[in-house]
């Protein structure tokens, strides 16, 4: 069975500081991995995805994530956070059947 | 390109009443999903359609929830009778058919409050 764990429920960072959101997955085969962002009252928007190849993937809004098979992780990073990045972030794992399973999310607060 | 449309955006009902949510996916997207997102939790898949056929409904509480996608385009999710624990945001999403493109396109969701 596939599952996703996001160990941090809530993170607070200062504007301009770096950010790392953790994600661990459980899946028997090579996973498809995603990060989505959800702003208040909005649907989810794809930030980036990993299918294969280069383990460091670049996404929108200056985000990147690194796939580490040995650690079953897909952590999201951003070198300098902006106030507009405050939102809920979800890691997800997908399979070849177009089925997607989401983690419980990490809420990001950005302080001036 | 129009996005995924959902209605209503908000609904308040009393327990044991019924409610229906509607979703129109992006044109050409064969796969349609309904997710339930309870406050403080991640989206949980309720049902996945490929065209008008059900791919996965293993987590749909079938004693009270039903969903259909009769013409392979728009879809309706119904809850009857509603319980307090059904209070959540119901998210509809769609994706292209075939090889996993990796992108779900989400609507803004329908927020249900059951009193």
Image (tube, coloured by chain):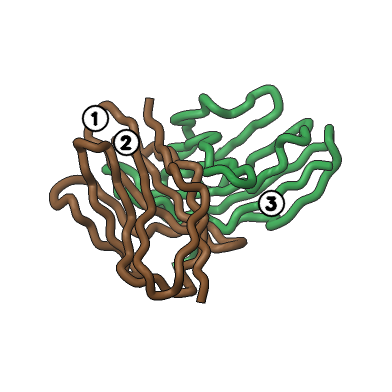
Chain colours: A brown, B green
Q: Residue furthest top?
A: B63
From the viewer's perspective, is B96 left or right of A29?
Answer: right
**Image quarter hosting the N terminus of chain B:** bottom left
Q: Which residue is mark 2?
A: A95
Element type where label 2 sits in the image: loop
10 Å neighbourhood of mark 3: few (<14), some, or many (≥20)? many
Which of A7/A34 is in front? A7
Residue B4 appears anywhere in the view: no
Q: Which residue is mark 3?
A: B111
Residue B97 appears anywhere in the view: yes
Task: Point out residue B93 in the picture as x, y percentages from the top left corner.
Answer: 49, 49
10 Å neighbourhood of mark 2: few (<14), some, or many (≥20)? some
Residue at 42%, 38% in the rendered image = A5
Residue at 49%, 66% in the rendered image = B2
Q: Which residue is mark 1?
A: A29
**Image quarter hosting the C terminus of chain B:** top right
Q: Disc 1 sits on a residue from what chain?
A: A
Task: Point out residue B106 in the picture as x, y percentages from the top left corner.
Answer: 49, 54
From the viewer's perspective, is B17 left or right of B51?
Answer: right
From the viewer's perspective, is A11 left or right of A50?
Answer: right
Residue at 72%, 35% in the rendered image = B85
Which of B73/B19 is in front? B19
Q: Earlier in the sequence, mark 1 or mark 2?
A: 1
State if disc 2 and disc 1 touch (CB < 8 Å).
yes
Residue at 41%, 45% in the rendered image = B30
How far separated are the C-alphas under marks 1 and 2? 9 Å
Q: Are marks 1 and 2 on the same chain?
A: yes
Element type where label 1 sits in the image: loop
Q: Disc 2 sits on a residue from what chain?
A: A
Residue B35, by quadrant, is top right
State if disc 2 and disc 3 touch (CB < 8 Å).
no
């Amino acid at each position: 069975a596939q599952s996703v764990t996001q160990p941090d429920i809530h993170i607070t960072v200062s504007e301009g500081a770096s950010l790392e959101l953790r994600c661990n997955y459980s899946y028997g085969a090579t996973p498809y991995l995603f990060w989505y962002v959800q702003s208040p009252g909005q649907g989810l928007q794809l930030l980036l995805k990993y299918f294969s190849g280069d383990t460091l993937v670049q996404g929108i809004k200056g985000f990147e994530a690194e796939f580490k098979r040995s650690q079953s992780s897909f952590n999201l990073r951003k070198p300098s956070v902006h106030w507009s990045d405050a939102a809920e972030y979800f890691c997800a794992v997908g399979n070849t059947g177009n089925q997607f399973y989401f983690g419980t999310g990490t809420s990001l607060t950005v302080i001036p | 390109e129009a996005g995924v449309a959902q209605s209503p955006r908000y609904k308040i009902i009393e327990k044991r009443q019924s409610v229906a949510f509607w979703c129109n996916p992006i044109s050409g997207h064969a796969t349609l999903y309904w997710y339930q997102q309870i406050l403080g939790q991640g989206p949980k898949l309720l049902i996945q359609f490929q065209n008008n056929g059900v791919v996965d409904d293993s987590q749909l509480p079938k004693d009270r929830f039903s969903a259909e996608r009769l013409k392979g385009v728009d879809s309706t999710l119904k809850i009857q009778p509603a319980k307090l624990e059904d209070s959540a945001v119901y998210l509809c999403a769609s994706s292209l058919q075939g090889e996993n493109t990796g992108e779900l396109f989400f609507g803004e969701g329908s927020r249900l409050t059951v009193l």
